[in-house]
Image: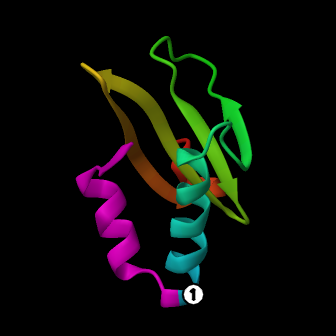
Amino acid sequence: MKIVYSKDSLKFLAKTDKATVQRIRDAIAGLVKTPPVGDIKVMQGYNDGTMRLRVGKYRVIFRYDKDGALEILYIIDIGSRGDIYK
């Protein structure tokens, strides 16, 4: 499975401390497993299968997609709990 990060998510990871980035990357690695590991919920109001992963006080917004036989995990956004849903 291929993981694709959006520009916003890479920007968040660049300005965050190393310990937090490592926790978030470990949690994202759990999304690649079958079945996915973590506190995952489907987001309301989205019809494209967008979900969120809870990592402490941070949220990772993502969705799965297929490009032919290749499965892709799109990391749409990463942010703190209070700011990510706005």
**Viewer-nearest residue: 22 or 2:** 2
- Residue of label 1: 19
Q: Is residue 51 above or below residue 29?
A: above
The answer to whether residue 10 is left or right of residue 34 is left
Check residue 7 for magenta coloring: yes
Looking at the picture, the colour scheme in use is rainbow
Density class for disc 1 (Cα within 10 Å; few <14, some 14-19, many ≥20) is few
Q: Which residue is rendered at x = 61% and y = 61% of the image?
A: 27
Quadrant location of residue 73?
top left
- Horizontal and vertical percent for residue 81? 65, 56
Q: Is residue 12 above or below residue 72?
A: below
Q: Which residue is rendered at x = 56% and y = 42% of the image?
A: 85
Q: Is residue 22 above or below residue 60?
A: below
Q: Is residue 71 above or below residue 25?
A: above
The answer to whether residue 50 is left or right of residue 34 is left
Over which residues does the magenta segment extend? Answer: 1-18
**Viewer-nearest residue: 18 or 3:** 3
- Horizontal and vertical percent for residue 7? 23, 55
Quadrant location of residue 68?
top left
- Horizontal and vertical percent for residue 21? 50, 77
**Secondary structure found at label 1:** helix
- Horizontal and vertical percent for residue 37? 71, 48
**Viewer-nearest residue: 32 or 74:** 32
Q: Quadrant of the N terminus?
A: top left
Check residue 10 for magenta coloring: yes
In the rendered structure, which amino acid carries the disc numbered 1? Ala
